[in-house]
Image (cartoon, rainbow, N blue to C red):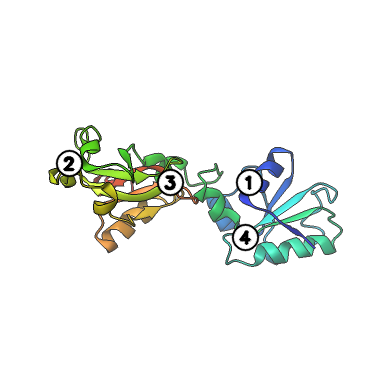
Amino acid sequence: MPKRASTAEVRRLSEAGAQLVEVLPPSAYEQEHLPGAVNVPMTELDAEAVSDLDPTRPTVVYCYDHECDLSARGARRLETMGFSDVYDYVASKVAWMAHGLPVEGSVPWSSRAGALARGVPTCRVTDRVADLDGAFKGDDRQCVVVDDDDVVLGLVRREVRQLPADTPVSDVMQPAPPTVRPSITATELAKSMDKDHRTYVLVSLLDGTLLGIIQREDLYGQH
């Protein structure tokens, strides 16, 4: 039975020389794929299609995301063809990109949120309004509330500085600010923000770690 692999495990396997196989159609592979991966669409997965692969080497099979079953089916198919060390990357390509890891393909990284995000002030949930005096600089409109690992917990707006100095940040923060993963393209993000009437969005990794912020005006000319 194929072994299930996490993103961290796939990264380790890849760095150690494992074979990466994307079983999605060529159009999806060409848009983005894990570095060094080969494309063997599930519809073409037979002995001839994998003849250039080494069945004795670790082989990681992936598809689009955790709801796509092609990686599981592809991994099982490889085992029936004699591959002895097969891994099913269940979370697949979306999770890889959501961790901010590099991909190859026709969509440049410069057009994705991870490249467009810019710095944003941060504060702690244990702070008080008095502690925010030095947080906002220039045109900064938001301060992101994070924990010691920079995981997003909430957000406070510049206007809260008008409140009493001893007001706890935890009492005035927005607890669920909108976030996107670094892999989303500027075009996709602009459409989403317009649909939801959002003026900003935070960019974070799959584990909630803050990367930065994108204001709607940052996307002008990027899509």
In the rendered image, which quarter contains the N terminus?
A: bottom right
User: Of residues 163 and 59, which is closer to you in this image?
Assistant: 163
Q: In this view, does 215 lie to the left or right of 111?
A: left
Circle 3 sits on which residue?
Answer: 151
Q: Are marks 1 and 3 in contact (CB under 8 Å)?
A: no
Element marked by disc 2: loop
User: Of residues 51 and 122, which is closer to you in this image?
Assistant: 122
Distance in Å between CA atoms under marks 1 and 3: 18 Å
User: Is 182 drawn above or below residue 48 in the view shown?
Assistant: above
Q: Position of residue 163 (x, y in %)?
A: 14, 46
Does residue 143 appear in the picture of this structure? Answer: yes
Say which of marks 3 and 4 sits in front.
3
Say which of marks 1 and 3 sits in front.
3
Marks 1 and 2, the one that precedes in the sequence: 1
Say which of marks 3 and 2 sits in front.
2
The amino acid type of the residue labelled 2 equals Ala
Element marked by disc 1: helix
Residue 165 is tagged as 2
Query: Would you call the spot at circle 3 few (<14 residues within 10 Å), some (14-19), or many (20 or more)?
Result: some
Circle 4 sits on which residue?
Answer: 24
Query: Would you call the spot at circle 4 few (<14 residues within 10 Å), some (14-19), or many (20 or more)?
Result: many
Circle 1 sits on which residue?
Answer: 8
Marks 1 and 3, the one that precedes in the sequence: 1
Marks 4 and 1, the one that precedes in the sequence: 1
The amino acid type of the residue labelled 1 equals Ala
User: Is 223 drawn above or below residue 63 in the view shown?
Assistant: above
